[in-house]
Image: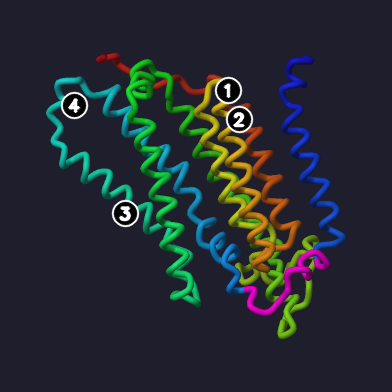
Amino acid sequence: MNKIFLKHIPVMVILTSLITIFLVGTFFDKQFSELFVRDGYEKNFFGVFVDIFGVPTFTIPLMVVVTVLYNWFLFSKIKPKTRDRIQRWKLITFWLIVFIALTLMTSIPVMRSYNPNYYLLIWVFSTLIYWTLFGYIFWFFNKKDQRQKFINQEYNLQTLLVMAIFCVGVYFTVFILKIIFNRPRPEATLLSNSVQEYQAWWNISYQNFSLKNESFPSGHVGISMSLLSILFLFKNKNWKWWTLTTVISLVILLIAFGRIIFLKHFITDVTMSMILGVLFYAGAARMLKKNWLKKWEVTKHG
């Protein structure tokens, strides 16, 4: 029992910290966001970058899932002789389609932007980062030691399903809460020419369940929490796991801060998405430990 309790301490500490920040933000939401109200806020490079980069962060774990499925099929279901006969152009075509599809997904923020010229420059920078990450993911899972893991059944269907459940679950919950709470964004309530009044997160707008106001909780932060799903591929919490956890946590925090200074969200908006993400992560991790789904039947072809 003590060992189980100790294992849950990090999650409990993080969750307690987020809930504390959320409660403090409940009373000082407006005052904190007012610190970032200034002329030209919409041209803040960091804010615009986060606006563009944050939406398609789900494509990173998606690229991981596609790559794992691809390599599982190629190295576990196809005999070596058959695999050798597969023409290179077919493989190139497949990955070209994947890269194009993911790039289109990263273009969503630019497509809906009211300032395409400025956003386009930052989109190019953001896209280069995504291409680099996609390329690294492809390279990593195609290394010799990783291929052996596919042959040895170390990657299984249950892990990928849990990753998908976690990603979809977090954002679907955020989406539903947006509709229910219908909270106006800071930029719609705090600027001098604002036409809407400030609304605390608990004041649910019962009369208008729509997506007109999408402040609570933060969709960008909810989507960025999907990056945590990659951690499910690790069997042990070694230095690689801790390093990746630290990097992902920093990305989530930067996206959350970027949404606040860009006047798209209040501090309670971003912390609520983090709280939901941590809860879903804890639930998914518990689900992963139970063998509720048998491993893929992999024929070892060497």
Pointer 1 or 4: first along the chain: 4
Residue 167 relative to residue 67: left or right: right
Stretch in magenta: 30-41
User: Is residue 38 located in the magenta-colored stretch of the structure?
Assistant: yes
Q: Nearer the viewer, mark 1 or mark 4?
A: 1
Query: In this figure, which residue is indicated by the disc labeled 2?
Result: 242
Measured in 3D between alpha carbons, the distance from the residue under mark 1 to the one under mark 3, in whole angstroms, is 34 Å
Crowd rating for badge 4 (residues with CA inside 10 Å; few <14, some 14–19, many 20+): few
Q: Is residue 180 above or below residue 278?
A: below
Q: Quadrant of the N terminus?
A: top right
Foreground residue among 288 and 94: 94
Q: Mark 1: which amino acid?
A: Asn
Dividing the picture into quadrants, the one containing residue 117 is bottom left
Q: Mark 3: which amino acid?
A: Ile
Crowd rating for badge 1 (residues with CA inside 10 Å; few <14, some 14–19, many 20+): few
Query: In this figure, which residue is indicated by the disc labeled 1?
Result: 238
Crowd rating for badge 3 (residues with CA inside 10 Å; few <14, some 14–19, many 20+): few
Q: Quadrant of the C terminus?
A: top left
Q: Nearer the viewer, mark 1 or mark 3?
A: 1
Query: In this figure, which residue is indicated by the disc labeled 3?
Result: 100
Measured in 3D between alpha carbons, the distance from the residue under mark 2 to the one under mark 1, in whole angstroms, is 6 Å
Q: Quick one: SS at disc 2? A: helix
- Image x and y of residue 212, in percent: 62, 72
Q: Quick one: SS at disc 4? A: helix
Dividing the picture into quadrants, the one containing residue 69 is top left
Q: Residue at x 69, y 55 (%)?
A: 270
Query: In this figure, which residue is indicated by the disc labeled 4?
Result: 83
Determine whether label 4 and label 3 are within 8 Å by CB.
no
Foreground residue among 299 and 25: 25
